[in-house]
Image (tube, coloured by chain):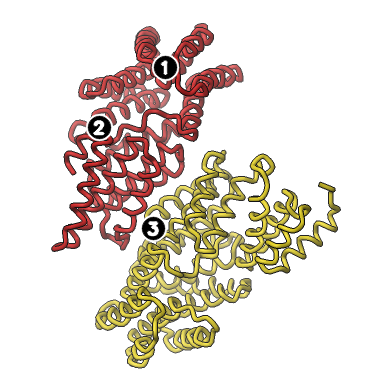
Chain colours: A red, B yellow
């Protein structure tokens, strides 16, 4: 199971095979039925997550469904397993674009982890909640999810990409309410970036850092960061990332009272070759939506968020989203 | 299609409503004029109107509407798609076809727009999960649905969702949560579904009496009175059986042993005389009767013998009967009501997880 967990992000297919092996071994534990059930729940959650990361959502869903049969929802029983299950399913629903369901399940997992006082897992759920709230456009949720942990940040271990992403998201969201908190969160988010091994994820974090800096008013630094990230994604041919960083750049330029330059950005998108032409159309449509919302006097960062969510959701519902949430 | 007059549409709706589901399906298949969005919409409206007092009739009308909608193209269905999918899911669920209920809801996920749609969709999913024995998911979805109904400015639907949560928590044995939510309900608010309000009040009365450190005796009595006052608004015989059963449990827990026993015995007798006996309900009723007699310090041997003498139709039913016999025997000297509640939840969940015959929750 440990190996299956370690391989989830880098080799999801292999992780799925290892998790399935763990399931078949767990099924043979006959001498201690509680131990068997516990091992089975954990192995099946790993398996479901590996299927999700391999974009095999139906198989992930079926595995979750089978896992639910093993749980004991009596009061005070089995809460760690129930929480793990709810969180695994929540992230699957998120990747399927069913955001309200994801939020409901993630909050349920959060409540169960809190009830058993597992602070590390509780914090992990809080950070995931913050990211989900951000995508759903609920800024007060971001502050509520992360706020309680700000004072004890370094004491609790957590996945570096998640911690960094959540802190930078918090920094961007907290600006209007509390600039000092936002600056603190920005510093923490930047510090944690160094521990993220995946290059593309690092680039996404740079783009997010750029957004946070822009919202704090550091426009020149922000432009440099986001443009550099966008160019790199363009070189790598990563359409979704190019589109999302283009939306950041558009919002930044509008916020800084500059020309948005949407034609140039759309031209870059159209220069990318894609197996599905509809993907290019959706990317251009996302930029167009941003422009029309801003023209209708929408605040640029709100327009950026709404356009980005529309874009991601449309990709998910059409099964065109190439990158599942990198949670393992 | 030739446009029908309002009168002829009304006549057609009346005709469909008077037919059995099978006959209605034949009528819909035979007459292309019946297969229209307008007729489906009117059936949905009539279904909604029947929902407060006649949940079973409501579901049948909804089923007819959905049958029509299924025969129309997705463009024609348009804006009613989410509403229709939720209704279809409830109908499928009530037919015990949970896979198709799930498919109905999944297929509308990408059409959900705004808090009201989302709230209805999540609530339908929650009840499906409840029927599948996936209780934690159901709880999470109901909590989110309640919040979305409030955001959408629909406080009565939010209250309905809270009532569902009261029932779910109570079934799970989470009495303090059930009581806490029941106390938050605005009792003066007119009820959208009297049967559901009655159920939640009667269930809350039981828990308020059971967890006496969390409530005053008057609160339990007030909840019981509230539940009883709503019973005359309900017409479905199946729902009336359920409400009488819940009333008996609350009365029993409040110490009115004789009255409670009279009700439970009468209900058991009614089930015994039924053409097709609902074994699970009979078994669970007997479980409560055993709990009641034990709480009153009375003899239970005849009930054990009666239950033991039943020839269960399935191995699962046999296991349930054995569990009741063994469990209640072991509960000697302990919290007999708490024990019976846990036993009931375990049996219900086992039936749900394994897709065994069980009366589905009549929510539509």
Label pair 2/3, CB-CB below 8 angstroms: no
In the image, is A178 to the left or to the right of B106?
Answer: left
Tell me the CA gap for discs 2 and 3. Answer: 33 Å
Residue B132 locus on image (x, y percent) = 42, 59
In the image, is A282 to the left or to the right of A42?
Answer: right
Relative to B53, say whether B142 is above or below. above
Frontmost residue, B36 versus B210 = B36
- The answer to whether tags 1 and 2 share a subunit is yes
Label pair 1/2, CB-CB below 8 angstroms: no
Relative to B129, say whether A124 is above or below. above
In the image, is A74 to the left or to the right of B310?
Answer: left
Residue sitting at 81 percent across and 56 percent down?
Answer: B9
In the image, is B116 to the left or to the right of B352?
Answer: right
Please give the residue where the numbered disc 3 appears in the rendered image.
Answer: B135
- The answer to whether tags 1 and 3 share a subunit is no
Residue B220 locus on image (x, y percent) = 44, 72
- Report which quarter residue B285 is drawn in: bottom left
How many residues crowd around disc 2 within 10 Å: few (fewer than 14), some, or many (20 or more)? Answer: some
Residue B79 locus on image (x, y percent) = 65, 42
Please give the residue where the numbered disc 2 appears in the rendered image.
Answer: A11
Sequence-earlier tag: 1 or 2: 2
How many residues crowd around disc 1 within 10 Å: few (fewer than 14), some, or many (20 or more)? Answer: many
Question: Which chain does tag 2 point to?
Answer: A
Residue A157 locus on image (x, y percent) = 19, 35
- Residue B107 visible in the displayed image: yes
Residue sitting at 32 percent across and 40 percent down?
Answer: A51
- Report which quarter residue A240 is drawn in: top left
Mark 3: secondary structure? helix
Please give the residue where the numbered disc 1 appears in the rendered image.
Answer: A242
- Report which quarter residue B62 is drawn in: bottom right
What is the residue that sits farthest to the front in this orientation?
B30
């Amino acid at each position: 199971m440990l190996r299956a967990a370690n391989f989830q992000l880098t080799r999801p297919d292999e992780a799925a095979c290892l998790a399935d092996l763990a399931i078949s071994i767990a099924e043979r534990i006959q001498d201690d039925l509680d131990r068997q059930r516990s091992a089975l729940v954990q192995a099946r959650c790993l398996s479901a997550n590996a299927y999700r990361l391999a974009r095999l959502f139906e198989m992930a869903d079926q595995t979750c469904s089978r896992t639910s049969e093993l749980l004991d929802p009596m009061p005070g029983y089995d809460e760690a397993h129930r929480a793990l299950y709810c969180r695994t399913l929540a992230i699957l629903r998120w990747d399927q674009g069913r955001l309200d369901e994801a939020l409901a399940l993630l909050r349920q997992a959060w409540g169960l982890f809190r009830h058993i006082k597992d602070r590390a897992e509780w914090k992990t759920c809080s950070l995931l909640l913050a990211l989900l709230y951000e995508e759903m456009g609920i800024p007060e949720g971001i502050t509520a999810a992360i706020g309680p942990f700000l004072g004890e940040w370094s004491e609790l271990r957590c996945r570096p990409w998640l911690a960094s992403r959540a802190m930078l998201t918090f920094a961007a969201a907290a600006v209007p309410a509390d600039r000092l908190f936002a600056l603190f969160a920005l510093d923490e988010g930047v510090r944690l970036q160094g521990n993220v091994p995946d290059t593309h994820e690092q680039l996404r974090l740079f783009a997010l850092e750029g957004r946070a800096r822009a919202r704090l008013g550091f426009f020149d630094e922000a432009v440099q960061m986001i443009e550099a990230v966008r160019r790199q994604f363009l070189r790598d041919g990563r359409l979704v990332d190019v589109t999302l960083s283009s939306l950041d750049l558009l919002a930044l330029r509008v916020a800084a009272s500059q020309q948005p330059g949407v034609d140039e950005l759309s031209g870059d998108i159209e220069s990318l070759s894609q197996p599905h032409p509809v993907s290019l159309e959706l990317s251009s449509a996302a930029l167009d939506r941003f422009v029309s919302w801003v023209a209708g006097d929408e605040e640029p960062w709100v327009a950026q968020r709404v356009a980005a969510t529309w874009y991601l959701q449309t990709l998910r519902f059409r099964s065109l989203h190439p990158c599942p949430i990198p949670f393992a | 299609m030739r446009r029908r007059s309002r009168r002829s549409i009304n006549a057609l709706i009346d005709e469909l409503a008077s037919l059995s589901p099978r006959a209605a399906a034949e009528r819909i298949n035979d007459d292309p004029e019946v297969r229209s969005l307008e007729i489906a919409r009117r059936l949905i409206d009539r279904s909604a109107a029947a929902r407060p007092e006649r949940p079973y009739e409501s579901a049948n009308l909804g089923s007819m509407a959905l049958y029509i909608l299924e025969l129309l193209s997705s463009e024609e269905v348009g804006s009613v798609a989410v509403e229709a999918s939720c209704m279809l899911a409830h109908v499928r669920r009530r037919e015990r076809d949970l896979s198709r209920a799930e498919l109905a809801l999944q297929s509308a996920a990408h059409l959900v727009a705004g808090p009201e749609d989302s709230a209805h969709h999540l609530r339908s999913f929650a009840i499906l999960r409840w029927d599948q024995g996936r209780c934690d998911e159901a709880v999470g979805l109901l909590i989110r649905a309640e919040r979305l109904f409030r955001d959408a400015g629909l406080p009565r639907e939010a209250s309905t969702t809270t009532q569902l949560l009261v029932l779910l928590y109570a079934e799970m044995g989470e009495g303090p949560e059930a009581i806490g939510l029941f106390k938050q309900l605005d009792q003066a608010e007119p009820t959208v579904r009297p049967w559901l309000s009655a159920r939640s009040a009667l269930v809350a009365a039981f828990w308020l009496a059971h967890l006496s450190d969390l409530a005053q005796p008057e609160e339990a009595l007030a909840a019981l009175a509230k539940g009883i006052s709503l019973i005359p608004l309900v017409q479905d015989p199946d729902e009336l059986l359920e409400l009488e059963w819940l009333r008996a449990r609350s009365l029993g827990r409040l110490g009115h042993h004789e009255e409670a026993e009279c009700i439970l015995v009468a209900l058991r007798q009614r089930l015994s005389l039924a053409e097709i006996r609902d074994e699970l309900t009979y078994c669970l009723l007997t479980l409560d009767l055993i709990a009641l007699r034990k709480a009153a310090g009375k003899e239970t041997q005849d009930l054990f013998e009666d239950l033991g003498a039943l020839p269960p139709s399935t191995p699962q039913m046999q296991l349930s009967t054995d569990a009741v016999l063994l469990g209640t025997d072991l509960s000697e000297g302990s919290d007999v009501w708490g024990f019976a509640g846990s036993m009931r939840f375990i049996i219900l969940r086992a039936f749900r997880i394994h897709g065994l015959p069980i009366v589905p929750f009549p929510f539509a």
